[in-house]
Image: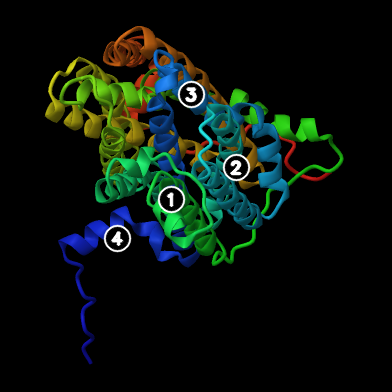
Amino acid sequence: MSTNAAPQRNFFAQRAHRFLAALVFRDFRFLAFSTLCSSSGAWALIVARGAWVYGIPELQGTQGLWVGLITFAAMSPRFFATPFIGYLADKMTRKTLLQQVYVLQIAQASVMAILVMIGISNPWYVVMLAVVNGTLRSTQMTASQSLTPNLVDRERLPNAVALNQAMQQGSRAVGPAILLAISVTVGGSAIFGSGGFSFSLQNLALTMGTSAIVFWSCAVFYLAALISALNVRTVSTGVINRSRSFWSNAAAGFSYIYTTPLVFGILMMALAHCVLVMSFESMLPPLALEKLSPDGITFNANDVYALMAALGIGALFSSLFVGGIVNHMTRGRMFLFLGFTSSLTPIGMGLSSQTGISMIAAIMMGLGTAGFMTITHTVIQSVVPDDIRGRVSAAYSMHIGGSMAFANLLYGRLADLWPAGNVMAVAGAAFTLVVLGTVVGSGFWRDIYFRGTARPVAAAAGTGGGDD
């Protein structure tokens, strides 16, 4: 009796199975979609807040500083709040924490929209809301990163981590692209309308067609994220040693990072990468003015959205591609390639004088930076034991987010004093030297790049993860 041969996948089905392997798990699909929606809202808020501040005439000469301050406010919670966030991500049910965060994100985005509707233009309100948004976003990222390994098998964990990063990084294209579509559809007043509040339906509709619609769109993103997260069924928590103090438990994540050479080395490289070539959000408005404005004088928020969307397109493709890499040696070589891509493309963007070249450089810059960070997350999430994953993710986020917060504040101010393109080019050149230094001067990094030794290792001792 003969049996039918198993059907062969065609070329596209094989590639989809390789690069999207983790999506076969139901709960991970819902988590990935919620991450895409929430991150789209976060990136939309970043560019919308920056464009709003940069367009205030009264801030002439200090717009870069204000954009940097608001970006700092949105990222700084990853520095000061992460010990508490990591503790919560291991103590609470992770899906419950995620769902609660999305409810609060809907509220803060709605408050921002209401402030715009009633015509309040004080940037300090935006700074305070940015702190709230940043705290909640840091919690969401830590919770989703900690939950991801619980939703897939170990074989497809690298792909799941990469897809989660693809949702976060690729959403740079989704959120800003939607804002761009809104702006083009309803005109320039859609972003910078004077607002005004009235209870008449006609005036309310007019107001909703101005700048408020941008921030209401962010609230809708978070609502979609909440609906998707409510469908996650997997229940997981970390392990908190109840005989030890909060600070002792929180410190376990830092102890693991500092005593695990592979994780510590990856962290140091990621820090240099984030400070020098990823902290560009505060420079987007002046960069858009320099590179995309026809006369170099007239500021248009659409250019900011287009620039961020270009970065997101490159980030999405890069993260998806990295997610399909299963060979450790290939991943190591790609890590080196993306390091150089991350360092050289900011130089190209900074020195370019043509719109087309600037947009291509933006796509390539998104490709390099997102792919580089996806590999760092993949390696770390593959190493860290589940008992302490929330606290390690939080500690990692504290280093990365804190460094980017201060770097954005600095770059925003420097963009008031020098051309933003020159600042970006110098920073890119500095990271080029860092990458070259790892190749020339460190056997540790050559092993990762050329021998593929960046693979899971035993957990460091003394994490304090279990109960006595």
Q: What residue type is labelled 1?
A: Thr
Which of the pair 50/276 is nearer the observer? Answer: 50
Crowd band around label 4 with a 10 angstrom C-alpha radius: few (<14), some (14–19), many (20+):
some
Q: Mark 2 points at which residue?
A: 136
Q: Quadrant of the N terminus?
A: bottom left
Q: Residue 17 carries which label?
A: 4
Residue 76, horizontal then vertical, whole percent: 57, 27
How much space separates mark 1 and mark 2, taking CA atoms?
A: 28 Å
How much space separates mark 2 and mark 3, taking CA atoms?
A: 17 Å
- Residue 205 appears anywhere in the view: yes
Crowd band around label 1 with a 10 angstrom C-alpha radius: few (<14), some (14–19), many (20+):
many
Crowd band around label 2 with a 10 angstrom C-alpha radius: few (<14), some (14–19), many (20+):
many
Q: Which amino acid does label 2 sit on?
A: Leu
Q: Name the residue under label 1.
A: 207
How much space separates mark 4 and mark 3, taking CA atoms?
A: 35 Å
Q: Are marks 1 and 4 in contact (CB under 8 Å)?
A: no
N-term mark: 1 or 3 = 1
Residue drawn at (41%, 33%) of the image: 52
- Residue 454 appears anywhere in the view: no
Which of the pair 276/454 is nearer the observer? Answer: 276
Residue 263, horizontal then vertical, whole percent: 52, 29
